[in-house]
Image: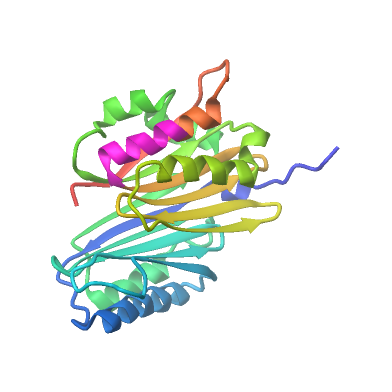
Amino acid sequence: MAQVLDDSKYAMGTGIFSIYEKVELPTDVKKRCMALLDLGNETLLANDFIILDFVPYPGFGNVGPDDVLKYSWILSESHRTLIYDPTSKRLIDELYTCSPEKDGSLMFAKTNKMLGKPARTSLMSEIVGKDIALKEEPDKLFHSVKEASMRLKLRGVSNFCVSAVFFDIPDRKLDEDSLEVMLTKALNKDDQKPVIESACRYDPQGYTYLHQSPKHFAGLHSYPGTLKSAHLSLIGTGAAIVSVLEDMEEVVYKSRRSEPTISIKVVAEDF
């Protein structure tokens, strides 16, 4: 019998979502791109994060002077994204980490030192262990995405950042190829092009997937050992987020007899 990986140490991590206003980056487009990349790298390395991959959208090529820049990093079982709007000079900074040792506090302090204090910040415990979630935040647990979207009023036109966890996922659905197929289908079905995607696999610890497009940011992390769960960070409009969550629910829990358990938390809205 194959030994089941004990990934319980990843059962609770940290999420940091911040909005910085009046962030001045160079007016030259190429210099602006590099400045945002340098900001992300320097502040992540201050926290000793291991940067495994970097995902630019719309990229370093034909970037227009008014294009919103989205840069994401895949870290060790974690991710970070920076979204900068040169028109409003607003910078959105979102970090998810499952490791209790890597809470991002040094990165956050370094970013504040470089940019000043954020206008808004949300700090939260990111729980991917079902037993802990049942004990500490039962009000965040739902049996369907439809129930969650109605209670949390997600279908509005406002922008949302949502933290979602799908618990009790069958082993065959936690396979990295299955996760990649289901997320690619959910995120790409009505997006404009180009769509930027990247993935890292941690054998046997799990799988990380990042997606960026005009409509979404998505960061997926799977926990296929004892936790049997997957965490999904989403940034986009309420309608877009609900659509992705419903597609994930359909694929993950299709033909299940028992009710699923899904955690959905609104990290931020109206930004």
Residue under the image location 59 percent in, 52 percent down? 207
Residue under the image location 41 percent in, 62 percent down? 80
Relative horizontal placement of residue 243, taking residue 175 as reference (left or right): left
Residue ranking furthest to the right: 1
> Which residue is nearer to you in this view: 8 or 267?
267
Q: x, y percentage for residue 177?
A: 62, 45
Residue under the image location 35 percent in, 47 percent down? 191
Q: x, y percentage for residue 86?
A: 18, 70
Q: x, y percentage for residue 195?
A: 40, 56
> Which residue is nearer to you in this view: 246 or 181?
181
> Which residue is nearer to you in this view: 136 or 51?
51
Relative horizontal placement of residue 187, taking residue 180 as reference (left or right): left
Query: Which quadrant of the figure contains the N terminus?
Result: top right
| Quarter occupied by residue 70 | bottom left
> Which residue is nearer to you in this view: 56 or 125?
56
Residue 4 lies in the magenta-colored region: no
Q: Is residue 216 above or below residue 45?
A: above
Q: Which residues are magenta?
A: 236-247
Can you see residue 41? Answer: yes
Q: Is residue 246 above or below residue 211?
A: above
Can you see residue 137? Answer: no
Residue 245 lies in the magenta-colored region: yes
| Quarter occupied by residue 148 | top left
In terms of secondary structure, what is the magenta stretch mainly? helix
Q: x, y percentage for residue 155?
A: 24, 33
